[in-house]
Image (spheres, helix red, strand yellow):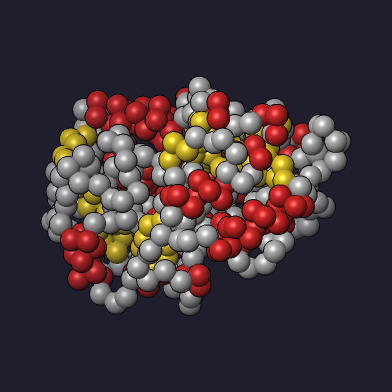
């Protein structure tokens, strides 16, 4: 038996996997190619860098993302502990100060006596037990090594990140603070557009010049992180029924919902930076400034980060992995994170948790307690390993992949809450074994 487990990648999944192994007394060698080498989407040297957004989505138990986070809290997740410690106000969502969050995760990992951090790129899958959590932006050399190991074709999609502006550059005479339907505190800055302003913005957005991305096609964009310009080209009102939806956000100056609204979400604890919600893009940087500055509240916006477009890669997991994220053809190797087809920060964390716990159980010669589809963590594991899925695509956690109650409950929120209560009761009953 190997005396240690190798974890490749110190993103959310890799850090969570390493932590769960180390907390169970298993020695870990955690490999991270930063700072010697980094992908086109990463900028900071700390671990668990949040690229696309600082939001970890809903924190309510009537939402599947909220359930998944609460399960992970009860399962002693490192990522959730650090996220909760560095949260910023975002209504009913969990959003974090991304720099403070990443710094906290890095400090926890580097100070753990059972974790040895090794800097530098990994170009081959090592011997012994290993968890590959190198992410959707895996380096070319490791990508080729994985491809040789699993055979067949990888699937590709493209992911996009939204711009960030400074708070002081937002024209608050043209904006107002509010959360949709008055839910929670007024944590979002809302940038309204009249019909004429929206018309000009939509026309500019749909005709703006995009940055070149090799192999990019609209049909290959993952729906959950679609560039705003691609979304806009699907129809004049698409944005008004989606990310620029004005319903439930009445302008206090008129008492009525505006024609369209762009929301800005706080990106750090100090409230000095704001993220353009839903505005993932791969327009050229000059075009981004020109187009988004057409929104009255952003006419003088100072952009601290422009949107970027990058390649994501994931496995055909139902054909390759079991429910512990182990490679069926070679179970000493596990995968975790977005490469497995779980989509989203918390989903990646959940896969890292499951892979880490399973590898620890295996290393210590004890069985991994089964988490079935009645829990969110288990439902994700079942989804990526379900060989009956014919056209596999990345998936966020949702109640549709969790087992139904088996009896009728009136009202969607009430039904979802009952499903969450059942899941948490199961987590609590298994926590000692896990």
Q: Is residue 318 above or below residue 55?
A: below
Q: Is residue 183 above or below residue 139?
A: above
- Residue nearer the viewer, 147 or 185: 185
Residue farthest to the top, as pictured = 270
- Residue nearer the viewer, 45 or 232: 232
Residue 271, image x, y percentages: 54, 25
Q: Is residue 292 above or below residue 140?
A: above
Report the residue at 38% width, 68% height from top. Answer: 156
Report the residue at 20% width, 46% height from top. Answer: 37
Residue 426, image x, y percentages: 56, 44
Report the residue at 56% width, 50% height from top. Answer: 291
The quadrant where residue 420 appears: top right
The quadrant where residue 66 appears: top right
Say whether residue 191 is left or right of residue 114.
Answer: right
Say whether residue 283 is left or right of residue 265.
Answer: left
Say whether residue 150 is left or right of residue 41.
Answer: left
Report the residue at 77% width, 52% height from top. Answer: 195
Residue 49, image x, y percentages: 36, 39
Question: In the picture, which quadrant includes the C terminus?
Answer: top left
Q: Is residue 185 visible?
A: yes
Q: Is residue 199 above or below residue 306?
A: below
Q: Is residue 345 visible?
A: no
Say whether residue 28 is left or right of residue 200.
Answer: left
């Amino acid at each position: 038996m190997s005396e240690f487990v190798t974890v490749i990648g110190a993103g959310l999944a890799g850090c969570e996997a390493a932590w769960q192994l180390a907390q169970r007394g298993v020695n870990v060698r955690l490999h991270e190619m930063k700072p010697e080498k980094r992908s086109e989407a990463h900028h900071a040297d700390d671990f668990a860098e949040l690229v696309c957004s600082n939001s970890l989505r809903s924190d309510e138990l009537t939402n599947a993302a909220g359930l998944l986070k609460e399960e992970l809290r009860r399962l002693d997740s490192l990522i959730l502990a650090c996220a909760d410690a560095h949260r910023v106000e975002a209504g009913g969502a969990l959003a974090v100060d991304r720099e403070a969050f990443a710094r906290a995760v890095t400090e926890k990992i580097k100070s753990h006596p059972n974790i040895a951090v090794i800097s530098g790129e990994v170009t081959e899958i090592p011997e012994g037990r290993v968890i590959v959590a190198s992410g959707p932006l895996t380096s070319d050399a490791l990508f080729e090594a994985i491809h040789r190991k699993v055979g067949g074709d990888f699937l590709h999609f493209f992911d996009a990140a939204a711009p960030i502006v400074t708070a002081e550059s937002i024209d608050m005479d043209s904006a107002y603070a509010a959360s949709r339907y008055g839910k929670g505190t007024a944590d979002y800055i809302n940038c309204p557009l009249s019909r004429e302003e929206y018309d000009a913005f939509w026309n500019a957005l749909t005709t703006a010049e995009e940055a070149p991305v090799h192999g990019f096609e609209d049909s290959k964009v993952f729906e959950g992180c679609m560039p705003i310009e691609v979304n806009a080209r699907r129809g004049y009102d698409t944005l008004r029924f989606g990310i620029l939806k004005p319903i439930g956000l009445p302008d206090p100056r008129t008492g009525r919902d505006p024609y369209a609204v762009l929301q800005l979400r706080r990106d750090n604890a100090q409230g000095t930076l704001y993220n353009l919600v839903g505005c993932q893009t791969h327009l050229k940087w000059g075009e981004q400034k020109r187009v988004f500055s057409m929104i009255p509240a952003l006419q003088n916006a100072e952009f601290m980060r422009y949107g970027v477009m990058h390649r994501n890669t994931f496995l055909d997991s139902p054909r390759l992995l079991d429910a512990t994220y182990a490679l069926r053809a070679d179970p000493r190797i596990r995968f975790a994170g977005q490469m497995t087809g779980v989509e989203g920060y918390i989903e990646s964390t959940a896969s890292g948790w499951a892979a880490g716990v399973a590898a620890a159980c295996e290393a210590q010669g004890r069985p991994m307690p089964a988490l079935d589809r009645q829990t969110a963590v288990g439902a994700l594991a079942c989804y990526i390993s379900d060989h009956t899925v014919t056209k596999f695509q990345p998936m966020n956690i949702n109640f549709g992949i969790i087992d139904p109650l088996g009896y009728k409950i009136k009202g969607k929120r009430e039904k979802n809450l009952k499903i969450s209560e059942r899941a948490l009761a199961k987590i609590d009953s298994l926590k000692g074994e896990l």
